[in-house]
Amino acid sequence: MTGITATLRVLHDGERTLERDLLTAAARHRTDHEIHHVATDLSRWSREHATRLADVGRHYDLDLPGPQSDASPGALTALKEKAAEALGRRPETGLLLLYDLRELHLAATRNSLHWEMLAQAAQATSDGRLLGLAGACHPQTLRQMRWTNTMIKELSPQLLVGA
C-alpha cells in the first residue's frame, strides 16, 4: 500500500465517520433548529466526499465502500428524538452540544489535514485526478470546520458561564 492509497483509505473512513457523527448530532439536538438543519446539510458534503473518494480509489485498486445506507429511523432513534425534545435547552444538554461540536470540529480538522496531504501528494506526482478531487472537496471540509468553530464561539460563553 502506498502513502496515497493509505491516505485515501483514512480520508474515506474519516468522511464516513464525520457524516455519521453530523447526523447523530443533528438528531440529538433536534430542538435546536440551526444545529439540526446545518449539521444535516453538512453531512451531505461528507457523504459526497466519501462517494467521490470511493470512485477515485478504484483507480488505485482500492475497494472502498459506497455511501452508508439510509436506514429508516428505528425505535431507538425515535426514543432519542423524543428525549431531545423533552430536554430542550437544559444546561446538561448545552454541555452535550458543546461536546458534540468539539468532536465534530476535531473530526473535520483531521479530514482537512488529510485533504491537504492528498493535495500535496497530487501536486508532487502531477496527478490531476487527485488534485481535482482535493480542490473540490477540501473547501467544503474547511467550511464544516468554520461552522463548528463559530458555533463553539457563540455558545461557549452562555453555556459554560451560565449567562
Image (cartoon, rainbow, N blue to C red):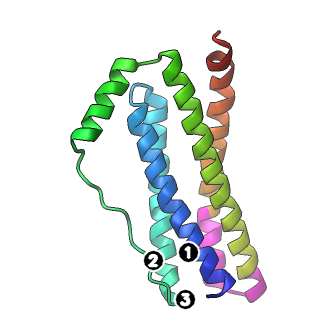
Instruction: Please tell me which residue is depicted at 72% across the width and 71% down the height of the picture.
Output: 117
Name which of mark 3 and mark 1 comes first in the sequence: 1
Magenta residues, as a range?
Answer: 123-137
Q: Which quadrant holds residue 113? A: bottom right
* Left or right of 102 in this view: 45: left
Mark 1–mark 2 CB contact (< 8 Å): yes
Whole-Å distance between the Cαs marked 2 and 3?
Answer: 10 Å
**Which of these two is toward me, 115 or 78?**
78
Q: Amino acid at mark 1?
A: Arg
Main secondary structure found in the magenta portion: helix
Say whether marks 3 and 1 touch (CB < 8 Å).
Answer: no
Residue 68: percent from left, percent from top: 36, 62
Q: Nearer the viewer, residue 14 or 131?
A: 14
Q: Earlier in the sequence, mark 1 or mark 2?
A: 1
Q: Secondary structure at mark 3?
A: loop
Q: Residue sitting at 52 percent across and 61 percent down? A: 15
Which quadrant of the figure contains the N terminus?
bottom right
Tell me if I can see residue 143 in this picture: no
Residue holding disc 3: 60
Screen quadrant of the C terminus: top right
Q: Quadrant of residue 161?
A: top right
Which kind of residue does numbered mark 2 sit on?
Leu
Q: Which mark is residue 64?
A: 2
Q: Nearer the viewer, residue 79 or 131?
A: 79
Q: Position of residue 84 (x, y in %)?
A: 37, 26
Residue 38 vertical placement versus 128 (above, below): above
The residue that label 1 is drawn on is 9
Q: Amino acid at mark 3?
A: Tyr
Local crowd size for mark 2, using a 10 Å CA cut-off: few (<14), some (14–19), many (≥20) = some
Quadrant for residue 10, please give it. bottom right
